[in-house]
Image: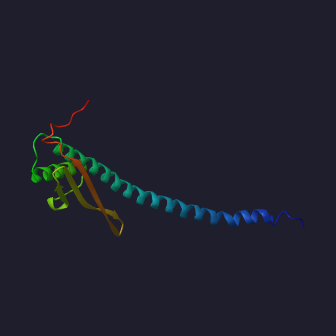
Amino acid sequence: MNGSTRPSKGKDIVLRNRGISTSGCLVFLILLVLLGFVGFKFGQAFWNYYNMREQVRDALVWTVGSMQPKSEIEITQRVISNASGVGVQLSPRNIRISQTPETLTIIARWTEELEFPHYTYPLNFEVNLTEIKRWGRGGLVVK
């Protein structure tokens, strides 16, 4: 008898490892897809945060850059209007406006719900911006 009917030891090892590496690769790919999905959800929420920060800054500059003081109701309406353009729903109770004789501060807070299968993760955000009032000073001078 010659050894041709019996597979060699090297081929036998390759056949045994083949199933383990395939399932390991599948688990790795599933994990990679799950991490990508979670990263996308968090990335989308933080993208909304940065867009919202710019919208609050726009409302703040609109307020302090005018020649006449704006009422807190006007400022609040402007922030809510800008927020809806980004897709963030704010109510007047989510916005706090504080003033000193020199500065104006707008604080906007909201919670974004990240929806996952069988779980919702609440993510709290806050934008807190302050500017120097320009009314009564002749407005902004650009040279």
- At 50% from the left and 62% from the top, the residue drawn is 31
> 63 or 8: which is nearer to us?
63
Furthest residue to the top?
Answer: 143
Taking 91 as reference, is 28 left or right?
Answer: right
> 82 or 4: which is nearer to us?
82
Structure colour scheme: rainbow
> 143 or 26: which is nearer to us?
143
Q: Where 132 sits versus 95, above or below?
A: above
Q: Position of residue 124 (x, y in %)?
A: 30, 63
- At 27% from the left and 55% from the top, the residue drawn is 127
> 18 or 72: which is nearer to us?
72
Q: Position of residue 15 (x, y in %)?
A: 70, 64
- At 17% from the left and 56% from the top, the residue drawn is 97
Furthest residue to the bottom?
Answer: 118
Q: Where 71 sits versus 16, above or below?
A: above
Total marks in image: 0
Q: Where 67 sits versus 130, above or below?
A: above
- Quadrant holding the C terminus: top left
Q: Position of residue 103 (x, y in %)?
A: 20, 50
Q: Position of residue 102 (x, y in %)?
A: 18, 49
- At 36% from the left and 66% from the top, the residue drawn is 117
- Quadrant holding the N terminus: bottom right
Residue 142, by quadrant, is top left
